[in-house]
Amino acid sequence: MNTFRTILFTLTSLFAFAANSVLCRLALSTEQVDPANFTAIRLLSAAITLALIVAVKNSTNLSKVSQFGSHSGAFYLFIYAAGFSYAYVSLGTATGALILFACVQFTMLLKGWLAGVKMTRQEYVGIILSLLGFLYFIYPELEKPSFIGCILMGLAGVAWAMYSLIGARSTQPLLDTASNFIRLLPIVLITLVWSYFTTDLQMSLQGWLYTIGSGALASGVGYAVWYVVLPHLKPSIAAVSQLSVPIWAALGGVLLVAEPIDLHLALSASVILGGIMLVILAKNKR
């Protein structure tokens, strides 16, 4: 893959990750989509999209897709998707993306530390800086209803980190991802049937478009593009590039959801992401 395509694919996937936050907020806050319906339809549309991609690439693999993925991977994927949706009922776009990204990185760092990975002084400084920024960010939320949203998004971040750690061992990432989404179809169908008999799945056209867009494009296509470009990126570059996701999500929230970015959020994001960058650069240097 040439340099131009690598940059193009990387930017496309990062925008897709940020778009998930924006589309979720648009669906839940603007169109009042139920978070359970959003989760189920998002997972269903992503599963269909990934199955189509697998079928186009190699139709013989689609019949054997159940041999890939894992129950643990599907479990963490579901916890991430559900926590993500319910958290955004009370969180702003930028706030949710920042909590999600920070918790993913903290979980991966903790997993490495528990596995006996030694850290340098710069890494410790970066971790402490990020934790202080995170505490500063969370403190004003302790007495607000959005604190529950913070907890749910933190849980989603931990689940996504565990899902990513499982995926890091994958030799067939696209097939494993498709399989994990497909494994969740029984839960998805039960949720949709329950919603149909209780709420008639009432949703505006815009709500349907936002929800399907989050699943089919931002999740299905976004993950597929990321897996294509990932082998062509150094781990440090892949990690640093994801620092931009909360920023893109914040800009999307301002432009599309009319959400302001206050000084508290800007300072918190700068400290947290700056600390994480110190850790990533230290690992790259080592």
Image: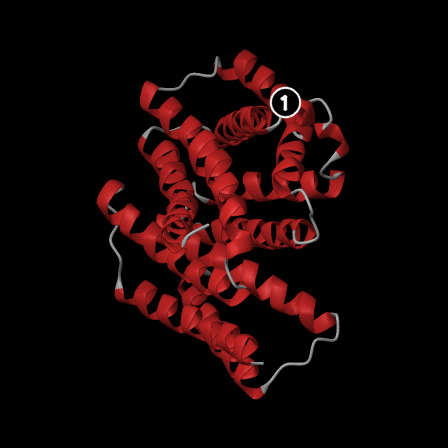
In the figure, 202 relative to 229: above or below?
Answer: above
Q: Is residue 131 visible?
A: yes
Secondary structure at numbered mark 1 = helix
56 left or right of 146 in image = right
Identify which amino acid the numbered label 1 is placed on: Ser
Residue 246 spot, x, y in % from top left? 39, 56
In the image as oriented, which residue stretches furthest toward the bottom?
Answer: 121
Residue 88 spot, x, y in % from top left? 43, 43
| Residue at 53% from the left image edge and 75% from the top image edge | 284
| Residue at 77% from the left image edge and 32% from the top image edge | 67
Q: Please tell me which residue lies in front, 30 or 98.
A: 98
| Residue at 27% from the left image edge and 41% from the top image edge | 257
In the figure, 265 relative to 129: above or below?
Answer: above
> Quadrant of the rendered structure where residue 83 is?
top right
| Residue at 71% from the left image edge and 22% from the top image edge | 63
Q: Give the crowd class for mark 1: few <14, some 14-19, many >=20 residues within 10 Å.
A: few
Q: Please tell me which residue lies in front, 133 or 280.
A: 280
In the figure, 67 relative to 171: above or below?
Answer: above
Q: Name the residue under label 1.
A: 59
Screen quadrant of the C terminus: bottom right
Residue 54 spot, x, y in % from top left? 59, 29
Q: How many marks?
A: 1
In the image as oriented, which residue stretches furthest toward the front?
Answer: 2
> Quadrant of the rendered structure where residue 78 is?
top right
Q: Is residue 144 visible?
A: no
Residue 8 spot, x, y in % from top left? 36, 48
